[in-house]
Image: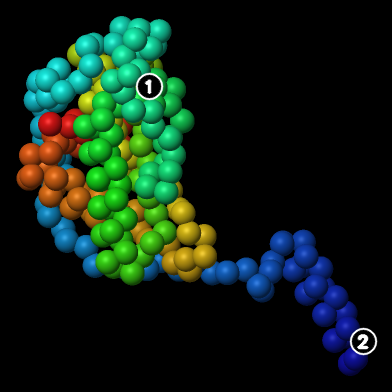
Amino acid sequence: MIKRIFIAACVALFIGVYTGCSCSDKTVEKKEIQIKHFGNFRKVFNDLNDKHLEAAKKNGVPKVISRKDAEKHKRQLVELKSSDLYKLDNLDYSIPFLVPKANDLLEKIAGNFQDSLRSKGVDSFEIVVTSVLRSEDDVKKLRRKNTNASQNSAHRYGTTFDIAYARYNRINNDYPHDIPVEHLKHILGEVLRDLRKEKKCYVKYEINQGCFHITAR
């Protein structure tokens, strides 16, 4: 009998080691938080490209032709870096610069998003910025890969940026819960809706790109 128990214990130990099982691993559970369902994102955030372009030309730098050309306008631009407010994504088709008004808007969005999370007892996520200033050359390269990308892009003036709605950067690994992405998306949507009502920005919900396309007014 003792021999059988010893063999069973050895087998259990072997299986645990082989599968990488660890009883000390933390279990991350989904946490439901209160959100306001305000309707169809596509209908709520439907500012078309002509509105974005009008605001971009009014508030931005002259249309940037190339990345070398962008150097001429650096004094009029603010360089973006990942911070405790937002994460700057890998930028393959844009460069990390915005005019001050757009930079202030981005920080306002990021800060309001985190304030809203904290009011719901969550302090573990930040937004991800996926695109900022694009030169004409960047737009051409992007359109070779994505034919849906606008040739007449507001991104060329330093007033426009994209924020992912399906990806968020976790900034507090000690927080024991995971929040459904759809809930985070709704909270970000509330923030953008409020700022849009205040006429601070235009917003377009981009389905194919998985982002909110935002231009400072």
Q: Is residue 197 above or below residue 69?
A: below
Q: Which mark is residue 3?
A: 2
- Left or right of residue 42, residue 22 in this image: right
Q: Is residue 146 above or below residue 172?
A: above
Measuring from the top left, give residue 93's x and y in whole percent.
Answer: 39, 20
- State which quadrant residue 4 falls in: bottom right
Q: Residues within 10 Å of mark 2 (few under 14, many from 20)?
A: few
Indicate the secondary structure of the residue bearing disc 1. Answer: loop
- Give the residue type that dot 1 points to: Ser
Q: Residues within 10 Å of mark 1 (few under 14, many from 20)?
A: many
| Residue receiving disc 1 | 94
- State which quadrant residue 87 falls in: top left
Q: Is residue 10 above or below residue 89?
A: below
Front-lying residue, 23 or 176? 176
Quadrant occupied by the C terminus: top left
* Gap between marks 2 and 1 measured at Cα: 68 Å
- Give the residue type that dot 2 points to: Lys
- Left or right of residue 194, residue 105 in this image: right
